[in-house]
Image (spheres, helix red, strand yellow):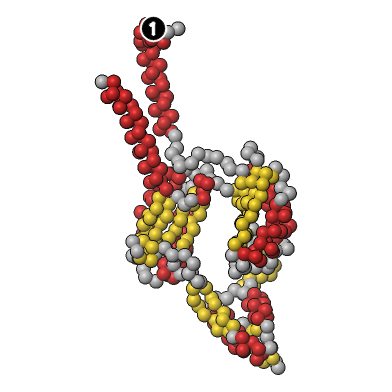
Amino acid sequence: MNPAKFSIARPVTVLMGVLAVLVLGTAVFTQLKVDLLPDITFPVVAIITSYPGAPPEEVEEFVTKPIEEAAAIVEDLKSIHSISREGLSAVIIEFDWGTDMDWAAFNAREKVDPVIERLPQDVQPPIIEQLDPGTMLPVIALGVTGIEDMRRLREIANDDIKPELEKLVGVAAANIYGGLEREILVEVDRQRLRAYELPVAQVENALRRENLNVPAGFTTEGPREFTIRVVGQFSCVADISDVVVATRNDVPVYLRDVAAVKDTHKQVRSYARVNGQPCVSLAIMKETTANTVEVSQTVREAIKTLPEKLPPGIELTATWDQAEFIHDALHNRYSVAIERAVLPMLIRC
């Protein structure tokens, strides 16, 4: 059948068909969610392990190799490679396309768990997660300003702002950068240790022994049952200084006798700036199934009312927003579509 003759002979049918396509297309278009990347499950699992203060050689020898050997027997494995750097080990496992990644991640965790007990004492438990490019970049970054005390500003960001943002729908985490993070520093005097004939390990063990919360069973009172805990965590710097490290001739040796305890901050490893001024930055990460544009809009609406719950003068500024790039890309696409529709008409005329 000739399409031209059919269209001339039955104009109403053709018109109804065109209208149906336009209505259906408009309905579907308005329901589509806008995002930067399509929803694709990449067959990759990463095992991230932190070993603070260790050089790359020790990280590779005592952390990366045992984990890599254990992960090498995971089912449906395609390839495996690792990265060892100062204080961090990353073992990347690649599977065949079509593999059930939930089961693959569980299988990897099952193979690695027995190795954890053989890792050095200071190694933190490995984090096993699926790699998703859509969740590796922050959706939106916020700058917190308003006070000059960077230590206090970071405390506000960590205690007040971070929990409120992580309650929002679609938000997986709010990572904090910049500012000063509190740290209790114990500086041991080597000469005093020698005078008391004490090893550094004894000071470390004494601190660990005293800074504990220990469960102590339960007690009953009538029909009610109460859990008992022995709270032994330090509440101030003076408590740390009063820790008994050893005893010499029935005289206790306190920590203050062999070390200086300072309430300070951790070494600055990251910086954040807003308009050249120091600030604390929060990088908002979305959940795997969440939509980037919707999460960005939710966060922007939240930061309009959030300062009301914070100390006076605190301001939140969006310094980077992935949704803006998505909107710009869509706007460029619409412009190109209009140009392609109009230019042929003008050329024919």
Q: Is residue 220 left or right of residue 300?
A: right
Residue for badge 1: 5
Residue 213, image x and y in percent?
63, 70
Please name the residue shown 41% across and 21% down the image.
21
The image quadrant of residue 164 is bottom left
Farthest left residue in view: 349
Q: Is residue 141 left or right of residue 79?
A: left
Residue 142, image x and y in percent?
40, 57
Of residues 188 and 66, the one nearer the viewer is 66
Please name the residue shown 66% across and 66% down the image.
58
Looking at the figure, which quarter contains the C terminus? top left
Residue type pointed to by label 1? Lys
Residue 218, image x and y in percent?
68, 66
Q: Label 1: few (<14), some or many (≥20) within 10 Å?
A: few
Q: Is residue 256 left or right of residue 215?
A: left
Residue 76, image x and y in percent?
70, 42
Please name the residue shown 69% across and 91% down the image.
248
Of residues 346 and 255, the one nearer the viewer is 346
Q: Is residue 331 visible?
A: yes
Farthest bottom residue in view: 249
Please name the residue shown 66% across and 70% down the image.
214
